[in-house]
Image: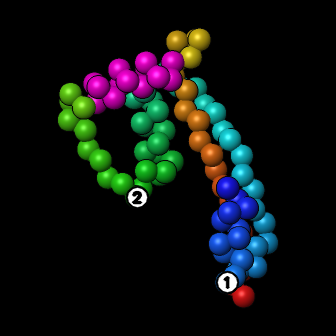
Amino acid sequence: MPCELTEMLSGQFNILMSEEWVEAKEFDSPINVLRHIKQTGVNAIQQNYFGKQQLNDLIKGYHKQFSTITGGVSLTYNPIIIIAQKK
């Protein structure tokens, strides 16, 4: 992914650094995953508000799909950092 992004940017920017990695975290519950997402601000683009039933459906589905052997749930994300200077 950084190669694709740096290629797109390289026409207008000098790429000083690019780095990508996969980060995995485990949480006690899907609610704690949502709190983590809110606290880190990674959902700042989209503002979704769940009703009670939608929240319950999300919790059940998240448990079903992302349960861990220890009884928690996992969250995996892929940070990409690009430092660029305009040409």
Q: Quadrant of residue 54?
A: top left
- The amino acid type, in three-letter code, at marker 2 is Ile
78 or 37, which lies in front? 78
Q: Magenta segment range? A: 55-67
For marks 1 and 2, the one nearer the N-term is 1
Q: Does the magenta stretch include residue 62?
A: yes
Depicted 24 relative to depicted 63: above or below: below
Of the 4 image quadrants, the one containing the C terminus is: bottom right
3 or 19, which lies in front? 3
Residue 16 screen position, x and y as percent: 79, 72
Element at badge 1?
loop
Q: Residue at x 72, y 52 (%)?
A: 20
36 or 84, which lies in front? 84
Depicted 39 relative to depicted 87: above or below: above
Q: In which quarter of the image is residue 49?
A: top left
Q: Mark 2 points at which residue?
A: 45
Residue occupying the far top of the picture: 70
Q: Residue at x 55, y 32 (%)?
A: 75
Residue 57 screen position, x and y as percent: 29, 25
Colour setup of the view: rainbow
Q: Name the residue under label 1.
A: 12
Mark 1 or 2, closer to the camera: 1
Marks 1/2: CA distance? 25 Å
